[in-house]
Image (cartoon, rainbow, N blue to C red):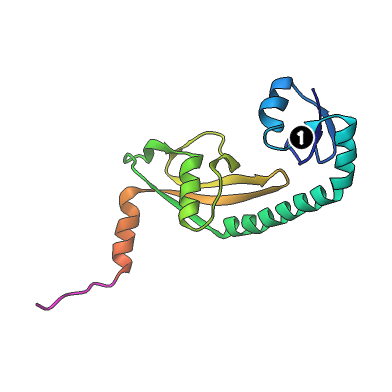
Amino acid sequence: MKLLLQRNVDKLGNIGDVVKVAPGYGRNYLLPRGLGVELTQDNLNRFESMKRKLIAMEQETKEKFQVIAREIEKADCTIIANSSEEGHLYGSVTARDIARQLADAGLEVDAKCIILDSPIKEMGTYKVKVRLHPDVECDVKVWVVKGGEISEAGKKSQPDTEYDN
């Protein structure tokens, strides 16, 4: 199946490229999401008239994601997890957990954008890649700490108050 791309698609092509894809990939993924249209003379003519608008829209989206990427790199992501004495987590930290923690910090990131080779199963500090756009990637620093460490540190930093009754 030949398609004319209307958006940049990672590992496939850029706006205006004519690509040959498997029929299922085209029908079930690219066409419904508006990433491409069937290659016909009518669609080619329509694309030429809309080309500048599509390229400008893609550039605007890319710039928006670049701003978000800078904010993500500044953000702190601390995940509190239950672990054994040796530092092995009883569960694992996944992309969904990191996305939820970033959302709590006010940064909406789709879990699909967070690239983990495998789930995190040890306590420690990790550098995790976030791909917001095919051309925009950033790193977020993720601290995985034991459940009691944060609460004890928080208690020490708060002043002791006594109540007179």
- Residue identified by numbered label 1: 36
Q: Is residue 125 visible?
A: no
Q: Quadrant of the N terminus?
A: top right
Horizontal and vertical percent position of residue 95: 51, 41
The image shows residue 41 at horizontal and vertical percentages of 90, 31
Q: In this view of the protein, can residue 165 be seen by the observer?
A: yes
Circle 1 residues within 10 Å: few <14, some 14–19, many ≥20: many
Q: Amino acid at mark 1?
A: Gly
The image quadrant where one finds the C terminus is bottom left
Q: Give the residue at x 37% y 41%.
A: 87
Residue placed farthest to the front in the image?
42
Percent from the top left, x then y, of residue 78? Answer: 44, 52
Q: Main secondary structure of the magenta part?
A: loop
Q: Is residue 79 left or right of residue 37?
A: left
Foreground: 163 or 105?
A: 105
Q: Secondary structure at mark 1?
A: strand
In the displayed structure image, the side of residue 30 where residue 1 appears, left or right: right
Q: Is residue 18 magenta?
A: no
Q: Which residues are magenta?
A: 159-165
Relative to 145, say whether 158 is above or below. below
Q: Residue at x 76, y 52 (%)?
A: 57
Identify whether 98 is placed above or below 107.
above
Which of 60 and 161 lies nearest the eye of the viewer? 60
* Residue furthest left in the image: 165
Q: Position of residue 111 (x, y in %)?
A: 54, 42
